[in-house]
Amino acid sequence: MRHKVAGKRLSRSTDHRKALRRTMVNQLFTHERIKTTRARAQAIRGQAERLITLAKKGNAADEAQMVHARRLASARMGDPEMVQKLFDDIAPRYEDRPGGYTRILKLGPRYGDSAEMVIIELIEE
């Protein structure tokens, strides 16, 4: 039973799974749309939405809270350029939106192993 166990393992070790999520979230924010499997998209969706919400709160807060929000985002993303893009470009787009910043579109099965492929993208206003 998996009662109260959050997240998907994705058949990877802990470090590999964290690296995969960090890389995929950075790619999502860089390209604003990526093609991946359904399981991976569902695994990164929550983290991406939480980072956008954090950036929105960091932009609206005072100076000390803004610095704290940027440090939290930097710890989760690892790339200073992506943190800057998140706070300066992506978060202001969703200032009036209460949530639901990503969309998952189904594409169908992959040829090699029939894994369900999807596109995860940031919603345009």
Image (spheres, rainbow, N blue to C red):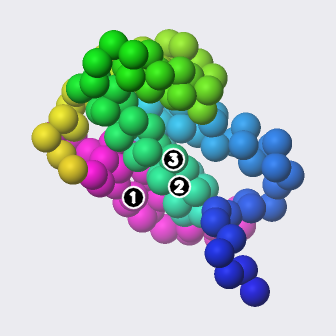
- Indicate the secondary structure of the residue bearing disc 1: strand
Task: Using residue 32 as the reference point, say whether residue 7 is left or right of it.
Answer: right
* Label 1 with label 2: CB-CB less than 8 Å: yes
C-alpha separation, residue under disc 1 versus residue under disc 3: 14 Å
Amino acid at the residue labelled 2? Ala
Q: Tell me the residue at 82%/49% (across/down).
A: 14
Q: Quarter holding the C terminus?
A: top left
Residue holding disc 1? 104
Q: Where does label 3 land, which residue?
A: 47
Give the answer, above or below, for where 72 lies relative to 34. above
Q: Is residue 124 left or right of 31 when viewed as pictured?
A: left
Assign the N terminus to one quadrant of the image. bottom right
Q: Is residue 12 left or right of residue 119?
A: right
Residue drawn at the location 13% of the way across and 40% of the way down: 96
Q: Position of residue 100 (x, y in %)?
A: 29, 54
Residue plotted at (37% across, 60% down)? 105
Measured in 3D between alpha carbons, the distance from the residue under mark 1 to the one under mark 2, in whole angstroms, is: 7 Å
Image quarter of residue 38: bottom right
